[in-house]
Image (cartoon, rainbow, N blue to C red):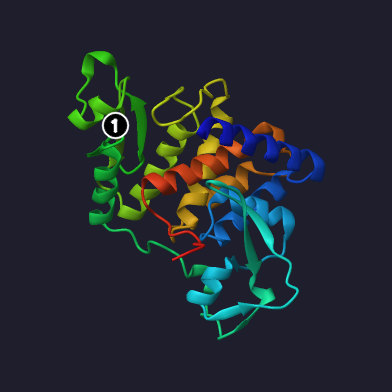
Amino acid sequence: MDDLNNKDERSLLTQLLDDSKLYKKGKNFKELLDFVNSLSNFAPFNVFLLHIQKPGLMFAASEHDWKNRFNRTIKEGARPLLILWPFAPVALVYDVKDTEGDDLPVDVAQAFRATGGLTAERIQAFINMLIKLGIDTKLIEYGDGHAGHIQQRPEHDLKINKQSVQAKEKPDYLIRLNKNHDPNVQFATLGHELAHLYLGHLGADKFLKIPDRQKKTHETMELEAESVCYIVCHRNNVKPNSEAYLTDFVGDKLQADDMDLYALLKAAGQIETILDLVEHTSFKD
């Protein structure tokens, strides 16, 4: 079922891009990433769908959340927006401008944020989550100029956690992080390296549901990984160096065809899920 859903999502995204002629220039691509960051109560792919339907959208939520979280009701005649939802074709959400009731929090778009300033304890919690998926993370004493990297463990150097052996049929992965860096920098590095993994830059992994996308140039891989890092970090209140990196590389010469937008949005959503980062919109108690 997951493979079918992924195929349907990719087909939908491709059609939307082709029909709308959107995001063909680097400037528009960067604007899309910023929009995805602004609505952290939806999975990245669904934020893209909302942007297609209503580019000026500031915040949206389900009727359930408007009532139970914000004590607001939907205005009569309001037109809903569509998102994809598990085990259902679509779900309906509403623009904040189509609701009425109590005053909103000062920064309503931040209402669902799951993390603030990162701590060493939080980084260790992420490391504990990842080992259950066969992704080992080591804190190494590096110089300040080296943040870290990811690799697939060579077969002659396997030190796989027992739970991981039972779950996976192939070697695990090793991420090295700079022990001397601030936890916020470590989080950004972790996001970048996990992006390489979930974007398929290391090859396919059936257990983790990762496709093989190794046939990319080094520059494209780095730009894809940094774009995913940019999404994951900003949606969780961490400002990475991606800002300057993307500004330098994502100019008007960049075409949307140079990168796989579906893969970027999906990888960002997968990383948020495995790290248990974001509480998304709910539709029932």
> At x 49% / y 69%, what residue is drawn?
110
In front: 101, or 241?
Answer: 101
In front: 167, or 192?
Answer: 167
> At x 23% / y 55%, what residue is drawn?
121
User: In the picture shown, does residue 141 fall above or below 213?
Assistant: below
Q: Is residue 24 visible?
A: no
Q: Is residue 258 visible?
A: yes
Q: State which quadrant residue 97 falls in.
A: bottom right
Q: State which quadrant residue 177 falls in.
A: top left
User: In the picture shown, does residue 150 fall above or below 74?
Assistant: above
Q: Position of residue 216 (x, y in %)?
A: 57, 24
Residue lying furthest top in this view?
A: 156
Secondary structure under tag 1 reads loop
Q: Position of residue 213 (x, y in %)?
A: 54, 24
Residue lying furthest bottom in this view?
A: 102
Instruction: Please identify the quadrant where the C terminus is shown.
Output: bottom left
> At x 36% / y 31%, what residue is drawn?
150
Question: Label 1, on which residue?
Answer: 134
Query: Three-letter amino acid code at disc 1?
Result: Gly
Q: State which quadrant residue 76 falls in.
A: bottom right
Answer few, some or many: residues within 10 Å of disc 1's Cα (few below 14, many 20 plus, some between 14 and 19): many
